[in-house]
Every structure is written in C-alpha cells, then in structure tokens.
Image (tube, coloured by chain):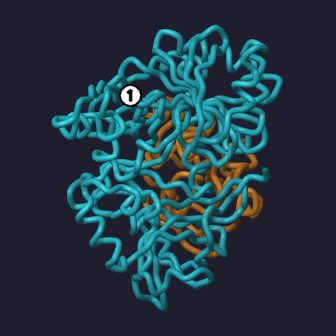
Chain colours: A orange, B cyan
Amino acid sequence: MAKVAAELKYSAEHEWIAADGSGPSVVGVSAVAAEALGDIVYVDLPEVGSTVTAGESCGEIESTKSVSDLYSPVTGEVTEVNDEVVSDPAVINTDPYGAGWLFKVTVTEEGPLMSAQEYAEANGGEL
Amino acid sequence: MTENYTALYEEHKKLGASFTDFGGWQMPLKYSSELAEHHAVRNAAGLFDLSHMGEVWVTGPEAGAFLDYALVGKLSAIADGKAKYSLICNENGGIIDDLITYRFGDEKYLVVPNAGNAPTVAAALAERAASFNVTVEDASAETSLVAAQGPKAEAILLKLTDESQHALVTGLKYYAFNEVTVAGHEVILARTGYTGEDGFELFLPNEGAASLWESVAQAGEEFGIVPCGLASRDSLRLEAGMPLYGNELSLERSPFDAGLGPVVALKSKEGDFVGRAALEAAKDALPKRKLVGLKGHGRRAGRGGYPVLKDGNVVGEVTSGQPSPTLGYPVALAYVDIEHAELGTALDVDLRGKAEPFEVVALPFYKRQK
C-alpha cells in the first residue's frame, strides 16, 4: 500500500504540503497519487514568481497512461521549482515525499487540508 | 457493468497487481511499473493473462464455408495448424470486432475475439450459422489464455517442454500453432501476440491455468520474465502499430478506413459474405479520413480524443497515444483527413489547448530486429 508521510498535510486533490515555519512551504504529490498515475513522464510546473490559488490548477502531470491537473493546495507566490523533476519526472514515483518535491510557495492562505491520518483513511494509504 | 474474473485472479492478487475494469473483466493493469514491464517484453520476456479474450469453436462439415460467410476473410484457405487475422463486420461494413482464427482441420476452427466483444461475436456467429451445417460453441468461460512474449519466450518454453517436443516449439512459425504439453499441461501453443515481439499464446482449460502461470513464471525467472498488465500491453501494441478495438476500430469505421483493406477478401471469395455489398462500395469510395501514425517532436503525448490540427483547423482525431517507452518520443494513432495523411506531413495535436508539433510517420513505430 502506498505510503502517507505522517509529518505532512494533504489536499483532497492528493498534493502534500510541508511547512516548518521557517520560510516557503514545499509542495508535492502523494505516493497514493503517484502510484495511481503510473510512471510519470512529464511535469509542467508553475513559474517562479507566479501566484497559485488553492484548489486551482497550476500545472500538469503526465504519466504513460494519462494527464492530470496539478492543483495547488494553498494560495501564495511560487519561490522555487524543482528542476530535477522536470528533467527526470520518474523521481516523483520513486521518492514523492523527498527528491520528488515540485515547488516552494510563500503561503498567504491555505486551502482545505487534511492531516496525514485523515488523508490515509480517505484514500487507502499507509501511515 | 458485469464483473468477470479470470481463473488467474488470485495469482494477480498475490503478485500485488493493481486492477482495472476492461471489457467487463477485472484485469491486472500493472504489477509494479508499467514501464519496467514494457521494457521486460522488449528485452527479455513478459507473462500476460489474456483469459478475458473469447474462444469460440466452430466445428462441422461446413465450418470453412460458414466462416467465409460470417467473416470478411477467406478462412477456408488457411492451412491446418495456421492462424489468420480477420474481421467480423455487420451488413453496413462496420467492424463488430477484429479476431484471430485458428484452423485445426477441415471441420474444426477456433475463433478468438476481444474480451468485451466476445458475447456479441459468439451471438453473431450463432445467428449467421443458421443455414450452415456447423456447431458454434462459446468456450470463453472455461478457457484460459496465457501469453509469454519477448525474445526469451522460446527459451523459457523449451525449459517447460519435453525434448521430444522441442521441434514443435522451435519450428513454430509466426501465426502457426501446435498442440504441446507445457509443464504437464496440454495446451494449444500459438506463435501469436500483440506486442511486436516474438512470443507465444497458450490456451488451456481454466483448471490448469494457475499451475501453468506459476510454472512459466518460475522457469522464466533466470531469463528475467516479469508479469505484465494491460498498461504495458497497450503501450507495446501501440508501438507495434496494432489497432485496438474501441480505439482504432469500431462499428462506425470500415476496414478500408483503418488500413485493413487487404484483410477483406473481395476478390478471392466468390460467394456472398456478411457486409460484402457495403464493403464493395466502401472500397471504391475514397475514405475521408485514414488511420496514420504520428510522431511527436516535443515530450508531450497526444491522447485518445485529442484533435489533430493543420494550421489551426481540425483535420483529424487521435485514437491512441502515449510516450513510447522504447523509442523515447510520443507516438499516436490518429484518423486524419486524407489530404493531410501523406508521410512527412507536419501536423499539430491539440494538447488541452496547446498545439504541439507532430509528423505523419510510417507504421509500425517499432519493428523488432529479426
């Protein structure tokens, strides 16, 4: 069963967000989503300096089988994107909570977020 | 939707498969990574459960004449021990299904339709058999089909067959079959497949399926065989330029639209067959669109249903598409207006609002080295 990282918060659209309170928050997709998508072959990320809005599409994730929107879990300004996953999207499958992070954002407003426990219960992940 | 399970369902669960509904069947989509499964078939071997496919036996003195009437090809002309790709059409020339027919003898043939169409095909065959001295028997529910595909498939099968039968395996030509004992099971061993690689398909009664599956997996371990789901099956057949019913083929398409004109035996069959009049007319009328291969210049793939554009105008539609794991660029099958279907034509695919450059290329996209 796909892992749900305990220290993160999750959106209903399967994005995770990590905030340690010391600057921009890191956003990625959950292992549950990465596994359901299949092997990821392309990601389109928001641009640095652009504003993303909670619950709205800010990019795309394409796997061998399908294309999905990437929804931002929060509203804020993008400060950095992970160029590593753009050149090697498979990292999202192998390390969704680590090297497979997608972008960093200065949060002005959170969307509805779940705890890891809640997300795992709703989506069949394993804590 | 009807939920059918193959005799290998428990095997798939044990292997940790993720499942998908396909044609009313609960089938493995993938076991681990569909890309790894795809590469295994190209480089070593893959093991597939295809038990969702149909098996319809046609027996009796007029079996050959009946199949010549019911299908578009000349099935009576197949040699014993050989198989042939054909189509079953309706009176309007629309494609009900594509299928493979195996000839065991003058009075005995096996017809293998696609999973979702098997009941329709069996019913159509039974109906068309009314004035022929034949028996049509749908054995789909009792029959399993396991495929070993890839360059190592032959070596794996040789490990599982008695030396006295090795020539029946190695001597088997493409689209031919023998009755062989594999790992203690009497199977129909056919050198057919849907992957573009060398490989075999093994028909046997459900009772032996799990045991055979495990034997092939075990014997293939040293050769790198992996179980493969429908996701890799789809990417493999797409690279090989093979049509999938429901994507490239449908009741609305004639065989000529789909580039399958040679499968229709208008010349060699003198008698009538279902769809003949409509197909005679379709042959002479130039189709408006034809099925072509597209190669993407970017990294993004066209998907089924995406519009194909020329100078911003819609000139076609993608029927199947994805990034080709073997070739490293996006490939797609698409119906394109005849005037834009020439090899080398530059076209765009509308990828969710963004036009991405593609080019008409020859099929298949991938051809194995022999």
Q: Position of residue B116 (x, y in %)?
A: 34, 39
Q: Is residue A18 above or below residue B261?
A: above
Count residues near mark 1 (Cα–Cα under 10 Å), then give few for <14, some for 14-19, many for 20+.
Answer: some
Amino acid type at circle 1 is: Glu
Task: Residue at 63% x, 65% y: name it.
Answer: B330
Dot 1: what SS? Answer: loop
Q: Is residue B243 left or right of residue B48?
A: left
Q: Position of residue B340 (x, y in %)?
A: 49, 85
Q: Is residue B152 left or right of residue B257?
A: right
Q: Residue furthest right?
A: B222
Q: Residue under circle 1?
A: B107
Task: Residue at 58% x, 53% y: name it.
Answer: A63
Q: Nearer the viewer, residue A115 or B138?
A: B138
Q: Quadrant of the N terminus of chain A?
A: top right
Q: Is residue A3 visible?
A: no
Task: Residue at 46% x, 28% y: name it.
Answer: B105
Specify the quadrant of the image occupied by residue B114. Answer: top left
Q: Nearer the viewer, residue B223 or B134?
A: B134
Q: Is residue B171 visible?
A: yes
Q: Nearer the viewer, residue B142 or B303?
A: B142
Q: Position of residue A17 (x, y in %)?
A: 59, 49
Specify the quadrant of the image occupied by residue B56. Answer: top left
Q: Nearer the viewer, residue A21 or B131?
A: B131
Mark 1, chain letter?
A: B
Task: Residue at 27% x, 29% y: name it.
Answer: B134
Q: Position of residue A125 (x, y in %)?
A: 53, 30
Q: Quadrant of the C terminus of chain A?
A: top right
